[in-house]
Image (cartoon, helix red, strand yellow):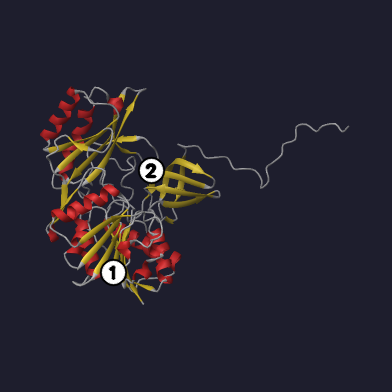
Amino acid sequence: MAKPVRGLRFQPSGGSRAAQIPVGKKQRLTIERLANDGRGIAFLEGRTWFVVGALAGEEVEARVLGAHGKVVEARTERVFSASDLRRPAPCAHAGRCGGCSVQHLPHDEQLALKQRMLAEQLSRVAGVEPEEWAAPLSGPEFGYRRRARVAVRWDAKAKKLEVGFRAAGSQDIVAIDECPVLVQPLQPIMSRLPAMLQRLSKPQALGHVELFSGSAIAVLLRHMAPLSAADLEILQAFCAFHEAQLWLHGEGEPQPVDPDQALGYRLEPWNLQLAYRPGDFVQVNAGVNEAMVAQALEWLAPQADERVLDLFCGLGNFALPLAQNVREVVAVEGVATMVARAAENAASNNLHNTRFFQADLSQPLSDAEWAREGFSAVLLDPPRDGAFEVVRKLASLGAKRLVYVSCNPATLARDTVELVKQGYRLKRAGILDMFPQTAHVEAMALFEAS
């Protein structure tokens, strides 16, 4: 019997595995270029580094947030050699709060970055360029956000309530006393909110807080245990001081403390009032939203005798302005409560040429009754996943014109491939600057049947 061999070390196939880089490690890097999400890209010892807060050409010190394989995610700690494009961050919480990742770029450079991101996706994935590039739709770069979700968490070890926004690259909460992108009516609420919440008797039972400014100001509190009478009194006094509605979200759906109060937002150019409840989807940038609706109507060019389809209709943000211009609007949404709310919005605005339906729009369009008569034009505003199954059947509806509003250039480009296969041409495209100071890109594209 052969004597066993001891002490040998066997390497796994493929060679030795490189040691993982620990979180928190600092590294000096030279940034080569910007990624599509606005992070700086550096290369070191076979790894690719994505660095929040860095610009092309800069030399920075970066702190590791996480690493997997040969990809390292980090954030800028110091800038040794700054780009000529860099500006001082307008927010005191820059680099810690995860909300505004490109605020060190001037606004015009932010727009150029987003334009490049859209063009690159359309070219690389779909192999197309629009026949015409539209100018960016943009508004004020600060004071635009009318809705915010504030993180709230009880730290049992420190016996402290944390209130603020999520940190960059982690689940930590950064205490925020002022947020430059919030609309002005929400600023004083944001600054006084932590002190008020700390007075409540069961801080460990608190969830998030949602703030909204529309036709009224609203504060919603998510809570996992019943509120005491004393706590409710504190909340009501706080909201009364700020002239805000109080909404509570315990079991079931969010509910207003005063059921007679109305909440919503206006589409002023069309003299429309849309009801809204915390938790509903709503575009957070009111000014760019109105400009977006106006541009969609201009591009779609609806005629008085036409039947138009609005997919992913939400509260009726596009459907109701469309209904003022056409014979009939058929609007479809996946969430039943939103369908009901949209139908109520149409009725309250005296629009009776709209029909609303609930359908799973992640699945292929079936032979639904509402689709059988066909449509002259289609507008769709899908979530980040896009609308691949929907666009596969759009040509069968007979639509000659299609406006696609996208919150993800990657899925817009993927869906463009399918639309081109069906004989549509990309006539026009452009970015919508819905979220200044962030790398988030919204876009609009006009397709016409060949």
Q: Say whether residue 80 is left or right of residue 176.
A: right
Which tag is nearer the camera, tag 2 or tag 1? Answer: 1
Q: Say whether residue 441 is left or right of residue 26.
A: left
**Amino acid under label 2?**
Arg
> Mark 2 highlights which residue?
78
What is the quadrant of the N terminus in the image?
top right
- Can you see residue 202? yes
Measured as percent of width and height from the top left, residue 7 is found at 75, 32
Residue appearing at x 27%, y 41% in the figure:
149
Looking at the image, is 165 positioned above or below residue 403? above
> Mark 1 highlights which residue?
377
Foreground residue among 419 and 184: 419
Q: Judging from the image, what secondary structure is the residue with disc 1 in?
A: strand
Looking at the image, is 75 positioned above or below residue 153? below
Q: Earlier in the sequence, mark 2 or mark 1?
A: 2
- The quarter of the picture where residue 298 lies is bottom left
Measured as percent of width and height from the top left, residue 17 is found at 61, 43
Total tally of numbered discs in the picture: 2
Assess disc 1: are there few (<14), some (14-19) or many (≥20) residues with their C-alpha within 10 Å of its C-alpha. many
Q: Judging from the image, what secondary structure is the residue with disc 2 in?
A: strand
Measured as percent of width and height from the top left, residue 137 is found at 24, 62
